[in-house]
Amino acid sequence: MEPVYRRLSALTPLSYEEIRVLGGFEARARDHGPGATLMTEGRATTRPSVVVSGWACHQRIMPDGRRQIFGFVLPGDVMGAWSGGRGRALANTVAVTPLSMIELPELDHISPDSALRTNISRAVKLAARQNEVFLFDHIMRLGCLTALERMAHLLLELRQRMAVVGLGDDRRFPMPLTQESLADALGLSTVHVNRTLQQLRRERLIEIAGGEVLLLDADLLASLADGTAPHPFTS
Amino acid sequence: MEPVYRRLSALTPLSYEEIRVLGGFEARARDHGPGATLMTEGRATTRPSVVVSGWACHQRIMPDGRRQIFGFVLPGDVMGAWSGGRGRALANTVAVTPLSMIELPELDHISPDSALRTNISRAVKLAARQNEVFLFDHIMRLGCLTALERMAHLLLELRQRMAVVGLGDDRRFPMPLTQESLADALGLSTVHVNRTLQQLRRERLIEIAGGEVLLLDADLLASLADGTAPHPFTS
DNA sequence: CGCCGAATTGACACGGTTCAATTGAGGTGG
DNA sequence: CCACCTCAATTGAACCGTGTCAATTCGGCG
């Protein structure tokens, strides 16, 4: 649950009492295996959920099999936080790894003047806004950047997000994505993702081992994708 | 003002009385020339505005000059409708043509139980959601589609949106964008946009003349970008 | 008529894709 | 503990969609 506390309190200050209440929800956690569909495109969204552990991604698949990944869902992230509150999901959300998540309580079920209610509601709104920031950055990657720049840019975003929830630091973080997933996110072929990663390794910018990424020179990486460097977390 | 009425009432039913009130705002319309910045990235958004006439686009420019257009703002569209309500603009909004827009009234200035207030508030929320739909479609274009498919896909989106506000029909609509703008939106070079348009003309799928696009065979165009065909307007 | 931005064209270079193997690593059953 | 299986990562070579550069033409407007 640690990532959940960290992530939510990065969005809005949470009191010890609220954290305690949230902790109570852990019992309701639902587990899913890799590949499980957590949300289906076109379906009305249920109440927002928070990921406790594991990664997921938002994606669409075209009839001919081409896949586009719109973004990744990391531990602590709020799913189903979209603009204008509830609505229909714009993409499928699929677990990438084994994943555990909890549904946030229906706001109507919390007393209206409870601090928890306002804080959860605010956190969900801010999460929605950040999802939009990620979408914009993603469009920059796809529309403006070269393969090398896209990869550097995405790695920096993931590092930043993982660090916020305490699952990584300035230099390293766990990265369970296959090169195929990276390819479908970055609009590249798997083969080219492979070669791009090799180039980053050859130039001593990153290392990959044991499901972890190590950023050897984050500054250089940033300058690769500079001017579009992932936005720091602000609300 | 016609496009504004059409667009808003496509989002939420408006009574005659409400349309009358909105009409009163026309006097407050603000005009801008092509290239004028309507909203600056990072700046706190002001109250939402509605475009009465003219086109704009959301864009970011990288230090080296590369430009990415995230989407276009058409007559009747609501600007500053983003997830989680107000916040900082995620991109610059720049007028593409001469443009006239009106700020929507501050919600606090309308009596809380007025139907106008709830309807405007709902319309803004739904507009925010649709903006997100457009963003997702845009990502599909950039990440998954070839040049020809991207162009077809975008033209279909624009046709649809222009038709909703009564500025076009199933076959034709005014299109003030330069090929350079199209290129920066679609992640292509100007030269290639030119060749792509030529190919569409050669294959008798479209015609362009007098600042208007004529879709000769929308079905074929749709099948070009199929499976990702622009989503119809739903809320 | 003459100007200027936009559209168009041609030749060429290159980033990225495709196809088809091959290698490597984690997990399972005997 | 090893053989085996499977999926992910890696490699090479050929191909092609787009980009780049540099003119040239077109079209609207003063």
Image (spheres, coloured by chain):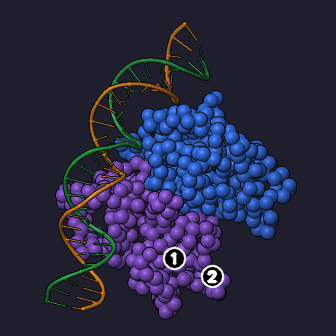
Chain colours: A purple, B blue, C orange, D green
Q: Are marks 2 and 1 on the same chain?
A: yes
Percent x, y of residue B211:
63, 32
Question: Residue D16, relative to residue A102: is it above or below?
Answer: above
Q: Quadrant of the C terminus of chain B?
A: bottom right
- Disc 2 versus disc 1: distance between alpha carbons? 21 Å
Q: Amino acid at mark 2?
A: Leu
Q: Residue at x 52, y 60 (%)?
A: A63
Please indicate, yes or no, whether residue B199 appears anywhere in the rendered image: yes
Q: Secondary structure at mark 2?
A: helix
Q: Quadrant of the N terminus of chain B?
A: top right
Taking depth in this image into account, of B40 and A224 the one nearest to the observer is: A224
Q: Residue at x 58, y 59 (%)?
A: B133
First in sequence, mark 2 or 1: give its number: 1
Mark 1, residue position = A38
Residue A230 falls in image quadrant:
bottom left
Q: Secondary structure at mark 1?
A: strand
Mark 2, residue position = A107
Is residue C6 toward the left or the right of residue A145 in the image?
right
Badge 2: how crowded within 10 Å, few (<14), some, or many (20+)?
A: some
Q: Amino acid at mark 1?
A: Leu
